[in-house]
Image (cartoon, rainbow, N blue to C red):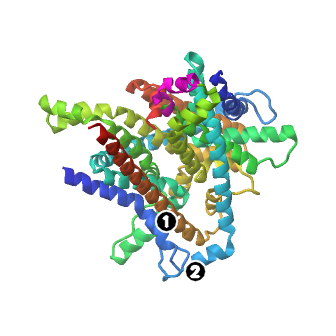
């Protein structure tokens, strides 16, 4: 029996519902409302370049923050006793299973001008702070929502590191800092790469977080795409933007995989 | 240094859990504003079960999650078996396509499928094609890679001689699969199915683009609260889901632990006679 053919239904499914839809996105990006070929959609993208750049830097910044916060946590998890590791693992998984919309909404009532934090400040006699409708709040929302996606792959990589390697490094005269920089850190690169990818991709394309926590004037590329399909209906422009967003992401992910030396199949395996 | 790291970890978990604790506390609040405490009540729980509108939406979400993860698990396991038998360029191409929905941002997947369905709608002359079926197709599509990626490593780990040995002993290839291979890869199938189920249950972005007004899932309804007043009974539902998922996770961990212990005692029993 040729078991190769078992993947037939899957291949047909993916052609129908992944490749053809992407082809349609291409088609829409290069046509106008009447179906005529045009480059107008692509040319109009220039005006949205600042928004694209803002989305890119905010999500890169959030990914780095997630890495800086997530690494010590993942490290601490990997050093805990097996029972504790299970508890930690569960506590990281739990938020991922619960509505991120409601959890972001909870942040709104924490940060609002009449929210919990500012109410507390007022009752202490302090002046309230502008905590919401700014860039910082959006970055906080991104870090909050996607931090577990960073911790998970880091933890998976860290528990797999062979203890004997660390002992060998110590025997060869490395101090704690050197063990970390020369052994642990290089071995956790695949986890760092997949963690950054898993934070960057959803962060750069988000529209809910910026709608809830950001200032109405400072939209992200996700907001603009969403409004092309759900608000001011212009699917052609929306398709062109999706194309650019996709290109940006494949470029970033490709570059990162290239420089870290992890190829596709391995990179996905650490998910 | 180690103590500092522990305190830091604790603070990060606090950061992750504060909004959730706030939601659970809000489910007992008499007022609708999360920021103002108006007194303790169970009335939101009562309202949740009396009105049932949110429960119906949760039912929709669960239905789509069960069906889509089931279909994705069957198709995906078959696909993994097929890909495992492939070599060279064909394997690379199929794995590359599998990576597309994983790397692509959800919004692009959602938009692409929405355009496909709109196109199919005009072709088939159906006015409102968006609904249950489009939602199911979309969920199966983004679930498939997760199943494949959790089954594939198990196939790679499996001893290829096992299936051959079964066939040498007179099994048909199908029997070799049901009697040998499936037991080897079952953990991968189960974890893939579970992942698909949770992904599907909580999916908002893709669902938002491919669903119509006649079949709404819970996350899409929660998003609509941006435009219409929030129903505080959603907090009660959140608190219940929080509790149920926590219990399920604890139960699963305890079962695993018991399994591990049992296996260990079996191993020692088996070793004893040979000593």
On the image, the x and y values in percent for residue B232 come to: 58, 72
Residue placed under numbered mark 2 in the picture: B43
Establish if B117 lies above or below B242: above
Question: Where A189 sits versus B86, above or below?
Answer: below
Residues drawn in magenta? B154-169
In which chain is the residue bearing label 2?
B
Q: Main SS of the magenta segment?
A: helix
Residue at 38% x, 32% y is: A190
Which one is closest to the eye, mark 1 or mark 2? 1
Q: Quarter of the image holding residue B179?
A: top right
Q: Position of residue A154 (x, y in %)?
A: 37, 41
The chain identifier of the residue carrying mark 1 reads B
- Secondary structure beneath disc 1? helix
Proximity of marks 1 and 2: CB atoms separated by less than 8 Å? no
Going from the N terminus, do you reach mark 1 or mark 2 first? Answer: 2
A89, A75: nearer the viewer: A89
> Does the image show residue B142?
no
Query: Residue A10 lies in magenta, yes or no?
Result: no
> Could you classify mark 1 by the number of other residues whose Cα lies within 10 Å: few (under 14), some (14-19), or many (20 or more)?
few
Residue A36: x and y in percent read 79, 29
The residue at 36%/61% (across/down) is B14
Instruction: Evaluate whether residue A42 shows in this view.
Output: yes
In this view of the protein, which residue sits in the foreground, A76 or B121? Answer: A76
The structure residue drawn at horizontal position 41% and vertical position 61%, both measured from the top left corner, is: B17
* Residue wearing tag 1: B243
- Comparing A215 with B37, the one in front is B37
Cα–Cα gap, marks 1 and 2? 18 Å
Residue B224: name its quadrant. bottom right
Q: How many residues crowd around disc 2 within 10 Å: few (fewer than 14), some, or many (20 or more)?
A: some
């Amino acid at each position: 029996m040729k078991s190769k053919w078992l993947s037939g239904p899957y291949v047909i499914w993916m052609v129908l519902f992944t490749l053809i839809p992407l082809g349609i996105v291409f088609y829409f990006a290069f046509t106008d409302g009447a179906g005529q070929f045009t480059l107008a959609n692509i040319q109009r993208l220039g005006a949205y370049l600042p928004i694209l750049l803002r989305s890119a830097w905010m999500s890169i910044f959030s990914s780095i923050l997630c890495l800086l916060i997530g690494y010590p946590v993942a490290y601490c998890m990997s050093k805990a006793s097996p029972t504790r590791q299970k508890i930690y693992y569960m506590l990281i998984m739990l938020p991922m299973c619960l509505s991120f919309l409601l959890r972001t909404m909870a942040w709104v009532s924490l940060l609002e001008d009449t929210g919990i934090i500012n109410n507390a400040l007022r009752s202490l006699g302090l002046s309230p702070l502008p905590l919401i409708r700014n860039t910082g709040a959006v970055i906080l929302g991104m870090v909050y929502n996607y931090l577990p996606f960073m911790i998970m792959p880091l933890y998976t990589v860290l528990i797999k590191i062979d203890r004997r390697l660390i002992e060998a490094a110590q025997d060869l005269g490395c101090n704690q800092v050197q063990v970390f920089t020369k052994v642990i850190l290089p071995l956790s690169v695949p986890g760092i790469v997949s963690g950054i990818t898993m934070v960057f991709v959803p962060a750069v394309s988000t529209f809910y977080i910026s709608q809830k926590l950001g200032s109405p004037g400072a939209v992200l590329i996700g907001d603009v795409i969403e409004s092309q399909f759900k608000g001011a209906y212009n699917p052609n422009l929306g398709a062109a933007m999706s194309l650019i967003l996709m290109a940006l992401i494949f470029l970033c992910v490709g570059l990162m995989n290239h420089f870290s030396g992890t190829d596709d199949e391995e990179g996905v395996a650490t998910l | 240094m180690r103590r500092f790291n522990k305190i830091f970890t604790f603070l990060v978990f606090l950061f992750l859990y504060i909004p959730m604790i706030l939601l659970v506390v809000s489910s007992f609040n008499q007022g609708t504003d999360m920021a103002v405490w108006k007194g303790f009540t169970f009335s939101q729980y009562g309202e949740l079960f009396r009105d049932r509108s949110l429960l119906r939406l949760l039912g929709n979400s669960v239905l789509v999650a069960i069906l889509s993860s089931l279909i994705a698990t069957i198709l995906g396991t078959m696909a993994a078996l097929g890909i495992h038998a492939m070599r060279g360029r064909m394997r690379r191409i199929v794995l590359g396509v599998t990576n597309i929905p994983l790397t692509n941002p959800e919004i692009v997947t959602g938009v692409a499928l929405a355009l496909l369905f709109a196109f199919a709608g005009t072709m088939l002359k159906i006015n409102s094609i968006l609904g249950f079926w489009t939602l199911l197709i979309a969920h199966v599509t983004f679930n498939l890679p997760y199943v494949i990626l959790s089954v594939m490593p198990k196939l790679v780990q499996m001893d290829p001689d096992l299936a051959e040995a079964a066939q040498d002993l007179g099994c048909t290839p199908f029997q070799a699969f049901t009697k040998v291979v499936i037991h080897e890869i079952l953990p991968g199938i189960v974890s893939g199915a579970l992942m698909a189920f949770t992904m599907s249950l909580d999916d908002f972005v893709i669902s938002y683009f491919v669903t119509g007004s006649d079949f709404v899932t819970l996350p899409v309804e929660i998003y609509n609260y941006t435009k219409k007043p929030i129903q505080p009974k959603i907090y009660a539902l959140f608190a219940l889901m929080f509790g149920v998922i926590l219990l399920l996770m604890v139960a699963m961990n305890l079962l695993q632990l018991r399994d591990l212990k049992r296996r260990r005692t079996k191993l020692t029993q088996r070793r004893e006679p040979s000593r």
